Amino acid sequence: MGNFLKGLAKFLAVLSAIAFVITAVAALLLLNTEQRMFKAETYTAALEKQNIYQELPALVSRTIVSAGAFDPCAQNPLTCEDISPELNACYKQVLGADRMTVLQGGAEQPTEAEQQSILSCVEKFRSGTASTPGGMPPYMQILTTADWEFLVRSILPPQDLQTMVEDFLTQLFAYLNGETDRVILSLAPLKKNLSSQPGLDALLQLIRSKPDCTLNDLIPIMNGSLPFCNPGEIVLQPIQPLLQEQLNMAANSIPEALIAIPPGQAGSNSPFARLQLARNIMRLSFMVPLVFLLLVTAFAIRSLRGWMQWWGIPLFFTGLITLIICLGTLPMVNLFWGNFIVPRFPAFLPNELVSAAHDIAVAILRELGKWIMVEAGVITSLGLGAWIGSYFISNQE
């Protein structure tokens, strides 16, 4: 009977040790995620390491030009406006009503076979569709990518952009941590630069970079229109007060701040409340492996050597498995990103912006992962040390 009870206790101890390893790995990941992912420093450090504040003006300019030149009808004719009933019926016939609804919503792009079917309908009822051309207003289409980048860097230089982003992130995580009841994005640096000398200098330099104005071009300029050609210094000098006035009007139309999250959004049924519940569960996750560790102690430990073995081995495998998970996370993220995230980006976004978003996501994961790997390394070392050390201690039950 005694041997049976000892065998049963050892069996239960092994099961408890296995359960400890599984739950301890999960708890280690959850605790670090809760502690690091809800700190603004994790994100500000990642953004700074990626040099995003220096690169963002170029990314924004490429996005503006790409979006301005994007024609959704060319990519997916089903998204065009003013589709005739005949063409609409043809689409429904070749695609099916359900699939047509999905494609019209823009959630997915047509396959090659579907594209051929769509084009056959367009050819058949060409006069029944009105393409909705993409693009910016004509007076903005003359601005090149370099022009936009120059404007963004002048009106919102990297140091001001970094201040705005970091202040926003600080407020956002203060809100998520229950330290404030609202999140505000300050636009004060943008307003200040637009209405002051940097804004005027940027506009003047942009005008001077354009081709010389013709006589016909000068007429609307002299009537108060904004020049989009170079009228020469003789004209530019006297109209500078007018240009500054227009910049002031543009700056005045921009609010001092935008309320990203207004007060009163943290009710009991709000996403904020559910997030706090999830965070509380993550904080308390360590209690589950602690229970299993106490069960291991109760079922199996009768000596110092037994304690070092029964605690050391589970701790060693907890740290080792966590390290393996951390090392395998980035390849899995890259695979997931390429297969599931990239296809869901809007088609007009330039590849550079998508690539930058990937790099930022990876940098954030690395900020989180480095802390988990340090802790996992310490746990692995302690577990291995206790496991090896147990062989140098006499077994006295």
Image: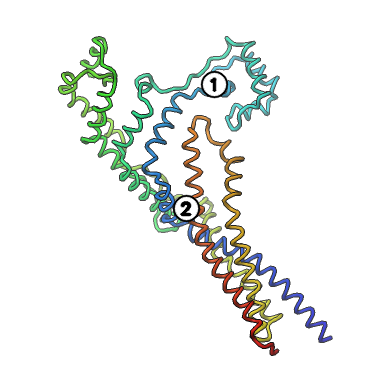
Compute the Cα span from label 2 to label 1.
41 Å
Badge 1: residue crowd in 10 Å (few <14, some 14–19, many ≥20): some
Position above or below: 84 against 39: above
**Badge 2: residue crowd in 10 Å (few <14, some 14–19, many ≥20):** some
Question: In percent of the image, x 37 and y 50: which residue is there?
Answer: 166
Residue sitting at 45 percent across and 28 percent down? 66
Q: Quadrant of the C terminus?
A: bottom right
Q: Nearer the viewer, mark 2 or mark 1?
A: 1
Q: Amino acid at mark 2?
A: Ala
Vertical arrangement, residue 293 with respect to residue 182, above or below: below
Query: Foreground: 277 or 73?
Result: 73
User: Quick check: 101 above or below 393?
Assistant: above
Task: State left or right for residue 384 relative to residue 170.
Answer: right
Q: Residue 376's x, y, as percent?
A: 56, 66
Sequence-first disc among 2 and 1: 1
96 relative position to 161: left or right: right
The residue at which mark 2 appears reads as: 266
Residue 130 point in image, percent of width and height? 53, 15
Q: Quadrant of residue 291?
A: bottom right
**Residue found at the very far bottom of the displayed protein:** 396
Q: In the image, 280: left or right of 304?
A: left
Do labels 2 and 1 touch, CB within 8 Å? no
Return the mark for residue 73. 1
Q: Residue furthest right?
A: 1
Disc 2 is placed on an element classified as: loop
Nearest to the observer: residue 331 or residue 339? 331
Q: Relative to 377, is 223 above or below?
A: above
Image coordinates of residue 256 in percent, x first then y, are 30, 41
Label 1: which secondary element: helix
Q: Residue at x 59, y 33 (%)?
A: 107
The amino acid sitting under disc 1 is: Cys
Q: Quadrant of the N terminus?
A: bottom right
